[in-house]
């Protein structure tokens, strides 16, 4: 996935994500009740733009 780095503590796509929000583009996100980093990574690989646990 462009802009995605599973080895970085900060997502490399943060600036493009903010720009997409400013433009009013569609973004897909989820809030998780299970604090699971592997689940957050899975959602990112599935195409979610943001996931928070």
Image (cartoon, grey):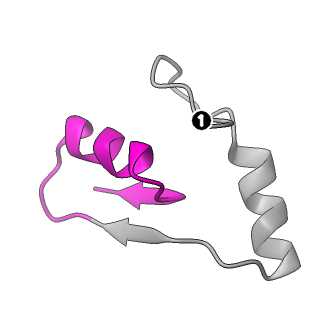
Label 1: element kind: loop
Q: Nearer the viewer, residue 5 or 8?
A: 5
Residue at image point 67% right, 37% down: 2
Residue at image point 34% right, 52% down: 43
Q: Which residue is mark 1?
A: 11
Magenta extent = 32-53
- The image quarter containing residue 52 is bottom left
- The image quarter containing residue 25 is bottom right
Residue placed farthest to the bottom in the image? 24
Residue placed farthest to the left in the image? 34
7 in relation to 51, above or below: above
- The image quarter containing residue 45 is top left
- Looking at the rendered image, the quarter that the C terminus falls into is bottom left
48 in relation to 38, above or below: below
Residue at image point 70% right, 46% down: 14
Percent across and percent down for residue 49 are 54, 58
């Amino acid at each position: 996935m462009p802009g995605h780095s599973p080895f970085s503590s900060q997502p490399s796509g943060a600036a493009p994500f903010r720009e997409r929000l400013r433009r009013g583009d569609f973004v897909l996100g989820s809030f998780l009740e299970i604090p699971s980093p592997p689940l957050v990574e899975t959602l990112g690989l599935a195409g979610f733009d943001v996931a928070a646990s």
